[in-house]
Every structure is written in C-alpha cells, then in structure tokens.
C-alpha cells in the first residue's frame, strides 16, 4: 500500500542519502543542552534559557554546511525559532538545500529498575502532522538500551523495538521519513564480543518489528551505534576492528532494501568518529565490490558540535569562527562517508564525548 506522501518521502530519502551527505543531530532537549553548558567550563557561566539556546542553534543553522548535510534534526523548540534578524530557521535550511528534521520522542521512562522505554507514542500521529505543516520532512525517535552481562533484558529489547516500529509506521503515514535509533549505551565495561552479541539481538528484533508493522524499508533510515566495546572496557578496539564487527553485524541483521544507515557518534572523540566512519566505508567498498547495499553515513551530534560549543563561549563575536569550525567538521565527515577522509582532523580536542546522563540513572531530560 502506497502512503499518501509516497512521492515526497522518496524525494526526502534520496536527498538525505545523497553523495557525501550526512545529518547533523542538533535535537538536544533544553535539559540536555543545559547539562552540556553546566559540564563545559567554557560555558558554565551561561544561563540555560531559550535565548541562549537560540543563539547557539543559529550558529549551526547558518553555517555553510549545505554541501555536507542532507538534513538537520531539530528539537521542537528550534523548529519554530528564527535568527536575530527574524528569518525562520526552517526557511534558512531550505534555502541551503538542507531538510529540516524533528525529534519526536519525549524522553525516557523507567522499565523496571535499570532499563527504559521511550515516551511519546500516544500523541505522535497528531504531532507528526503538525511538524510536517511546520516544515519538517523527517523525524527521529531514540531508544536507549543499557548493556551489562545480563542486560538488555528480552522485555526491554522487544518493547523498544515495538515502539520504534510503531513510530516509523506513523511517521511514514504522516509524510515524515523515520530515523530509527536503537542506541546501545556506551557507558559500561562490556567487551567487543558482548557488543556484537547485543547489537545483533537488538537489530534483528528492530528489523522484525519494522517488517511486521509494514514499514517501507526503502523509506526508512537506521541510526545505530558502531559495534565497539563499552567506554569503560579496558581493551578498546581500533578502527579496523570496529569496521569489521559493524559490517559483520549488519550483514547478519539488515535487509538490503533499507535506505541508509546514519551512525551516531556515541562516546567517541570528534576524530575517532570520523576515522571509524571512514574505515567502515573503505571496508564496505572492498567487501561489497563497490556495490554496498546501504548508504553508510553519519548523524552525529556531539562529534559535530563539541568543539564548536567550546569555541562559542556564549560570545556573539565568536560566531564566525564557530561557523568555520562547524564547516570543517562537516567536511571531514562528508569525506569519511565516501571513504575519502585524510588527516589531519580539524578537531582541537581529543577528549571523549561520553555523557553519563543519557540513559538510566540520568534519563535524558525533556
């Protein structure tokens, strides 16, 4: 059965999966962005109010990144914001050929004592219709799965996969391309073998539920974690091992008609995220003889923003330098999604971007 907005959905997918294109994740909730301000010494003096957030988001929206980003995921607050001169962010993005996207989940809710599900399905249909009218053309829904020796539980995997599938179906019916994000939380000490095991379990269940709900995979995007050990594991993996493990899991789990895979950057440094993405694409080119089944790109948040945020310091006079840094990071990852990245990396920092408040015991603020 064709969807009402079938043609529009296909056009949006084609644009998002364009050559050298990725997606900027700038959909942090006010609470999450507030924690970043508080936890960053250069920004801790700033008050977490809407105008502060608007000023920062204006830098991201007005950077000349149209050749690198097919879309930008926005928070509901940002979708209706404008520049200081009164020009709507959505219009600026469209003028640059960048599709506006929207975070549609409403944060995490407890599932038992240690796990979570995601809120927002009960009002999703009407909100998707509204967001499309306001200019959004794709959406994102995030689940968060904690990993230990015994977690995630089967119940957690199944309930989150079901939510992701129902969300994706509703989005397609309402004319928004769904980005499905089953995030396997990096803040743990699990090893590579456990990462592969959990990634396989989660992705198989997500795909099964998507197909069960008759989600059109050609009009659907996946946003997974790269397959790698937890951030506290004493034995970390190099980019060659991450690339091989990631493609092994994908070969076992993902259907060939899935439109694209847009990786999240997890707890990686800005440089590690780029290097891993580049290595994944180089290996995919070799493994699939230049005919890889899926677009393999990026939907990074922290790995495209961390150094920009620090450089900004809340000072409007730093905006031009911030836009230059934003473009440099975007260009590096644009090259990486074609396997063409060459060092040096534009990031001035080698700090890990792990955030411990993004899962259970620190559920993502709304």
Image: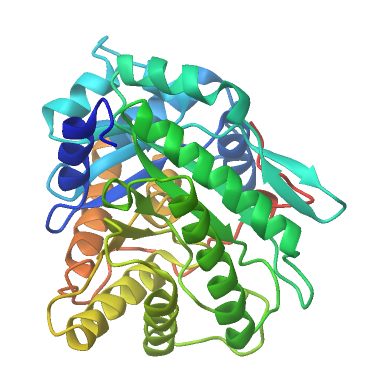
* Residue 117 on image: x %, y %: 69, 45
> Extreme top residue here?
86
Q: Is residue 349 above or below residue 308?
A: below
Q: Quadrant of the N terminus?
A: top left
* Residue 77 on image: x %, y %: 47, 21
* Residue 135 on image: x %, y %: 28, 20
Q: Which residue lies at the image location 46% right of the left edge and 61% below the top edge?
A: 224
Q: Which residue lies at the image location 26% right of the left edge and 22% below the top edge?
A: 90
Q: Is residue 13 above or below residue 297?
A: above
For residue 165, side relative to residue 159 (left or right): left
Q: Residue 4 sits in which quadrant?
A: top left
* Residue 123 on image: x %, y %: 57, 21
Q: Which residue lies at the image location 32% right of the left edge and 52% below the top edge?
A: 217
Q: Nearer the viewer, residue 349 or 100?
A: 100
Q: Which residue lies at the image location 62% right of the left edge and 62% below the top edge?
A: 185
Q: Quadrant of the C terminus?
A: top right
Q: Nearer the viewer, residue 125 or 322?
A: 125
Q: Is residue 185 above or below residue 249?
A: above
For residue 35, side relative to residue 112 (left or right): left
> Extreme front residue here?
1
């Amino acid at each position: 059965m064709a969807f009402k907005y079938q043609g529009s959905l296909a056009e949006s997918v084609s644009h998002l999966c364009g050559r050298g294109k990725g997606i900027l994740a700038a959909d942090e909730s006010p609470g999450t962005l507030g924690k970043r301000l508080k936890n960053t010494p250069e920004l801790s003096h700033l008050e977490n109010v809407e105008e502060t957030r608007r000023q920062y988001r204006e830098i991201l929206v007005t950077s000349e990144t149209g050749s690198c980003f097919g879309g930008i995921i926005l928070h509901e607050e940002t979708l209706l914001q404008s520049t200081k001169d009164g020009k709507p962010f959505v219009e600026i993005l469209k003028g640059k050929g960048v599709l506006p996207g929207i975070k549609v989940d409403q944060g995490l809710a407890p599932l038992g004592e240690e796990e979570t599900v995601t809120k927002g399905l009960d009002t999703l249909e009407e909100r998707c219709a509204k967001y499309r009218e306001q200019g959004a053309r794709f959406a994102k829904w995030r689940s968060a799965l904690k990993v230990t020796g015994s977690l995630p539980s089967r119940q957690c995997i199944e309930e989150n996969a079901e939510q992701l599938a129902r969300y994706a179906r509703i989005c397609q019916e309402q004319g928004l391309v769904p980005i499905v994000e089953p995030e396997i939380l990096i803040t743990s000490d699990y090893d590579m073998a456990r990462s592969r095991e959990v990634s396989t379990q989660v992705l198989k269940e997500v795909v099964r539920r998507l197909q069960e709900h008759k989600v059109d995979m050609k009009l659907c995007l996946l946003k997974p974690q790269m397959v790698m050990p937890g951030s506290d594991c004493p034995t970390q993996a190099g980019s060659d091992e991450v690339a091989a493990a990631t493609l092994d899991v994908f070969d076992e789990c993902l259907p060939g008609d899935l439109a694209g895979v847009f990786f999240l950057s997890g707890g990686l440094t800005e440089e590690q995220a780029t290097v891993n993405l580049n290595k994944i694409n180089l290996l995919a080119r070799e493994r699939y003889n230049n005919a890889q089944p899926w677009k393999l790109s990026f939907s990074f948040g922290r790995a495209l923003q961390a150094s920009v945020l620090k450089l900004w310091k809340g000072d409007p006079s730093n905006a031009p330098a911030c836009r230059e840094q934003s473009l440099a990071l975007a260009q590096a990852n644009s090259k990486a999604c074609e396997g063409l990245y060459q060092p040096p990396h534009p990031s001035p920092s080698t700090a890990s971007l792990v955030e411990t408040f993004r899962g259970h015991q620190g559920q993502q603020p709304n």
